[in-house]
Amino acid sequence: MRKAIAAAEVGDDVYGEDPTVTALEARVAGLLKKEAALYIPSGTMGNQLGLLVHTTRATEVIVERNCHIVNHEGAAGAWLSGVQLLPLRGNKGILYPADIKQNLRTGQYGAPSTSLICLENTHNLAGGRVQPLDVLREIRTLALDNNIPMHMDGARLWNAAAASGIPEHTFAACFDTATMCLSKGLGAPVGSVLVGSHEHIARARHYRSRLGGSMRQAGILAAAGLYALDHHRSRLSEDHARAKALATALNNTASFSVDPDDIESNIVFFHVANDAAVAAAAALKQHGILVSATAPDTIRAVTHLAFTDEALQTTQTVLETSFCTPITT
């Protein structure tokens, strides 16, 4: 990947003259079977561009309450687009058509109108859960019947495809726009891509400039994304297998618990006895195992291309030898 970065042909992408960025955008648009794509610095920007493209101020966006847009984007929807988010409680991150239908608002006096439906795939805080395709198709039908567009936070769409065996473009067909990260599972150092129609991407390019997301010789970064698509996308199932093995090892300790059958992709949330998540994360770090305490009794771990079979074996040994008794704060 570093060699690809060093060898990248570049130009000024603000003027559409960087051939490597153009190649990356065309590649992702083709994979998702959308008309056009836009290279952007981050997934958060991609989601916010989705809101800007589809909504008008003082309207309402339906989301799942634990999704990234609600919890990790600093209320940017309110700040940038002037929209109100309506967070609905999902079932392990999944919203169903009935949940959405009863919360649609289309012109009631004094109420904001629903302008967009946003769904996340895979769902991060639900433990990397894949959105069921049949459910997405039903929601898409509901949205079309009510003339409401849909945006997908597909930061980990590559993982959703690897876990389900369903191509990325099949998921994307349920949405008007979608964003995918090239970092995270694919291992590029930076960057995401937003896809949609020619009209949507033209508008998104305009908003990207307003947000300060236009870059000059960005081909050195786009080259990493192209390399990741060519070399890292096909190996994502390895991360998923290691995540399930990690969950089994965690569940065999006295300190942690998790149901390995709940692991669908590369994210493992596990329970920590005695509300000792912070202490447990610190103890794991001393062994070179980096995780995040997300609640007093919960830790999040993510498997990735640097978490090899050797790293998994080392982790299993650490868990067996150092966490055989419950942790206390």
Image (cartoon, rainbow, N blue to C red):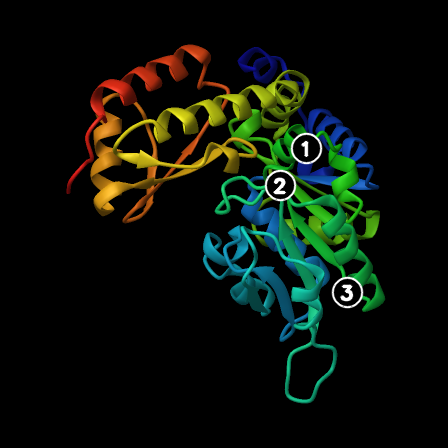
Whether residue 219 appears in this view of the structure is yes
Specify few, some or many for label 1: CA neighbours under 10 Å numbering under 14, 14-19, or 20 or more.
some
User: For the residues carrying marks 3 and 2, which lies nearer the camera in this image?
Assistant: 2
In the picture, the quarter occupied by the N terminus is top right
* Residue receiving disc 3: 148
- Seen in the picture, residue 207 relative to 276 is either above or below; the reply is below
Whether residue 209 appears in this view of the structure is no
**Label 2 SS:** loop
Q: Earlier in the sequence, mark 3 or mark 2?
A: 2
Q: What amino acid does circle 1 point to?
A: Ser
Q: Residue at x 48, y 35 (%)?
A: 267
Q: Which mark is residue 130?
A: 2
- Seen in the picture, residue 234 relative to 77 is either above or below; the reply is above
* Residue receiving disc 1: 164
Q: Quadrant of residue 7?
A: top right
Q: Nearer the viewer, residue 102 or 18?
A: 102
**Label 3 SS:** loop
Specify few, some or many for label 2: CA neighbours under 10 Å numbering under 14, 14-19, or 20 or more.
many
**Which x, y percent locates residue 54?**
72, 61
